[in-house]
Image: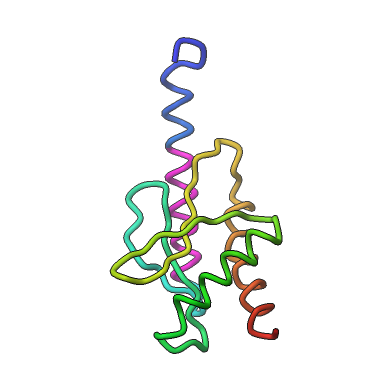
Amino acid sequence: MRYHGLRAFREAIRKDLENATQLAELVRAEPALELLAPVPLSAVCFRYVAGLAEHERDAFNTRLMARLNARGRVYLSNATLSGRFALRACFVNHRTTAEDVRTVVAEVLATARELQGA
């Protein structure tokens, strides 16, 4: 705190919140994705739903997360919300850019297509 000052920490937190809001907006705009919770902080929970019956979604998103992380361009964790498996993006790096946020959606969609084609 003494070295960077409060302003730097406030700015980093503000940017993380902005990135989370941007991702939530991108998820809402993409019919293949479903936002699973409000986004008051820096975590965004969502899942891939296109072409999947409700009973298939947890298993598919579990495989999607593993393949996505193995691809190495973005890394997501997971959460369980109301009994549903969720992909979880949490913004905590002050170097994350708006392009990085857009890449999350692009990579999730590309990975889903890859899995559905397999």
Q: Residue at x 43, y 38 (%)?
A: 14
Q: Residue at x 60, y 68 (%)?
A: 108
Instruction: Tell me residue 2's x, y (percent).
Output: 45, 10
Q: Residue at x 44, y 22 (%)?
A: 7
Instruction: Tell me residue 38's x, y (percent).
Output: 32, 60
- Rendered position, 57 above or below 107: below
Q: How is the image coloured?
A: rainbow
Image: magenta residue range = 14-28
Residue furthest to the left in view is: 82
Magenta region, main secondary structure:
helix
Tag count in the figure? Answer: 0
Is residue 34 a member of the stretch shown in magenta?
A: no
Is residue 19 a member of the stretch shown in magenta?
A: yes
Quadrant including the N terminus: top left
Q: Nearer the viewer, residue 33 or 80?
A: 80
Find residue 63 and report its image quarter. bottom right
Instruction: Tell me residue 104's x, y (percent).
Output: 59, 60
- Rendered position, 56 above or below 7: below
Quadrant including the C terminus: bottom right
Instruction: Tell me residue 83's x, y (percent).
Output: 31, 70
Q: Residue at x 70, y 56 (%)?
A: 72
Residue furthest to the top in view is: 2
Q: Is residue 105 left or right of residue 16?
A: right
Q: Is residue 88 left or right of residue 104?
A: left
